[in-house]
Image (tube, grey):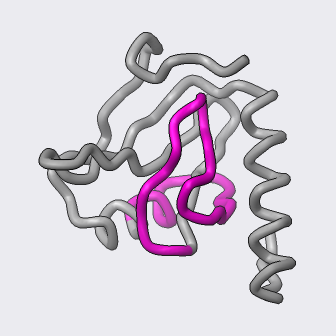
């Protein structure tokens, strides 16, 4: 079972941003970027946004756009969880197969 984001030790690295700004931030500041569909669950929270939704992964973090209706988009840097990273990789593979895009990692 996943973890609750609100109870995790996370860092807000960008706030009150537009979705495009948050996506660009993740692309520029992550070691590896995976792409998933809107509605994909990370830590039991469905991601909201314009596809493809980037998720950044590093040695000790997962970075994602967290949209709160009425509050806007935030980029959160969460502690890495290997189980979640594996789910993200599967989501990326499904996204790429569905859209027939090749991305190099």
Q: Which residues are magenta?
A: 25-51
Whether residue 94 is in magenta: the answer is no
Q: Residue at x 75, y 85 (%)?
A: 99
Pick whichever, 81 or 72, lies toward us. 72
Q: Nearer the viewer, residue 66 or 104?
A: 66
Q: Which residue sits at x=44%, y=73%? A: 50
Residue drawn at x 75%, y 39% as measured from the top left: 85
Horizontally, residue 16 falls left or right of residue 61, namely left
**At which x and y percent is residue 12?**
30, 34
Q: What residue is shown at x 26% (from left), y 47% (from top)? A: 14
Question: Image quarter for residue 68?
Answer: top left
Taking 89 as reference, is 61 above or below it?
Answer: above
Query: How many numbered marks have been drawn onto this rendered protein structure?
Result: 0
**Among the 4 quarters of the image, the one containing residue 77:** top left
Q: Which residue is situated farthest in the bottom direction here?
A: 100
Residue 7 place in picture, x, y as percent: 43, 11
């Amino acid at each position: 079972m996943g973890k609750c984001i609100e109870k995790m030790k996370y860092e807000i690295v960008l706030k009150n941003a537009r979705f495009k700004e948050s996506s660009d931030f993740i692309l520029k500041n992550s070691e590896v970027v995976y792409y998933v569909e809107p509605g994909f669950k990370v830590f039991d929270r469905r991601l909201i946004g314009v596809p493809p939704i980037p998720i950044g992964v590093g040695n000790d973090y997962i970075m994602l756009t967290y949209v709160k209706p009425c509050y806007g988009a935030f980029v959160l840097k969460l502690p890495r969880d290997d189980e979640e990273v594996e789910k993200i990789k599967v989501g990326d593979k499904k996204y790429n197969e569905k859209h027939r895009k090749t991305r190099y990692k």
